[in-house]
Amino acid sequence: MRPEDWELRRLAVSAALAEEYFGFRNADGQVVVPLDQAHVFAAARVDLWERWPQVPRHVRGLAGRYWHVRPDDLAGRAMFEALARTFATQGRGLYRLPDDVPPREATYLLAAHAHQPLELVRQLVREAEEYHYSTRGPLPVAGPGRWQFGGSTPSVVTIPDTEEDAHVRPLRVITAPYAATTTVMRKKILRLARRQAAAGPGRHGWKPGVLVSFMDRLQDASGDPATRLNLPAGKHTVVNAPTGVGKSVLMNARAPLLADRDQGPVAIVVSTIHDSLTNAEKIEADDELVFQVTAQLARATARQKLRCVPLVTTRMPTPPHWTGCTPPTISA
């Protein structure tokens, strides 16, 4: 796909979404697409439209995929309208300008295609994703030395000389529709801990006892023993317990379980870069150990290995750091 073709497609996606929900026919039977509404989709400002939450989930998913790959310059209204008018005058686009209005005064486009709008969106988004990811190359990273991040309590990372001229592949995250409630059963958490203990007694032999003790004392909001952890979407679930009783062990055990069930990616928020790095290494090493042992016992399925990635951001005064556990459906 040529860059100019991508320009046409990135505009056409927003116009097709506007056609589906705001388009109408004029007296001549032509489908009118208002530029105002098209810009709402191009700029990802659907919060301005009160009916957006009622739009079918698969359409919202398409819009999200579009926003992930579309350039940020479309967010500006003046830039968007200028690009839309320019490409609509070329005569080879999916939308065109009306004949009786000067191009600079046009406030709407006319559909010049025979597709169903949402089918057109689906096709254009797929092509846009292919183009977007095909143009991404390895990213340069920080070189050897001592690096410091954060404010009053900074984190310090030392990168060895062996990492000179290192590059990383861009991380591609493919999300799935959210589940209303995510449930992790007590028995599955304990089963994972026992498998880790069996695979490496010296390193993980303590885990089953800690988790059994913690789960035995874990109660729900009504005071009854908790046999499962229900995590409703859009809400915070607070697990309140003293230091050292197993909260972190429980969270680190839940992350690979959820990711392995295609309910990832799972992010664990920690306070420092060091914690992010060590968490990723520990979780991946634990999963690798269980994977190898089950394979040796001929009990392994088609399940692929877990991938844990430390993610660090410095865009906030007190930056959050993450350990991202991604399921096999995630590609890098």
Image (cartoon, rainbow, N blue to C red):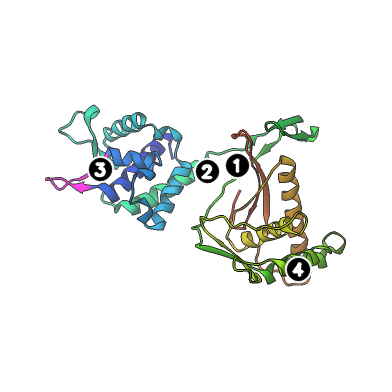
Kind of residue at disc 4: Val
**Front position among marks 4 and 1:** 4
**How far is disc 3 from disc 1 in space, using C-alphas?**
36 Å
Callout 2: SS: helix
Q: Which residue is mark 2?
A: 133
Does 87 lie within the magenta span? no
Q: Are marks 2 and 1 in contact (CB under 8 Å)?
A: yes
Callout 3: SS: strand
Q: How many neighbours does mark 3 have within 10 angstroms: few (below 14), some (14-19), or many (20 or more)?
A: many
Mark earlier in primary sequence (2, 1)? 2
**How far is disc 2 from disc 1 in space, using C-alphas?**
9 Å
Q: Quadrant of residue 319?
A: top right
Kind of residue at disc 3: Val
Q: Which residue is mark 4?
A: 212
When the figure is inspected, residue 51 is found, relative to residue 206, above or below; the finding is above
Q: How many marks are shown on the rendered structure?
A: 4
Kind of residue at disc 1: Pro
Q: Left or right of 36: which side holds 211?
A: right
Q: Left or right of 242: which side holds 94?
A: left
**How far is disc 3 from disc 2 in space, using C-alphas?**
30 Å
Q: Which residues are magenta?
A: 24-34
Q: Which residue is mark 1?
A: 170
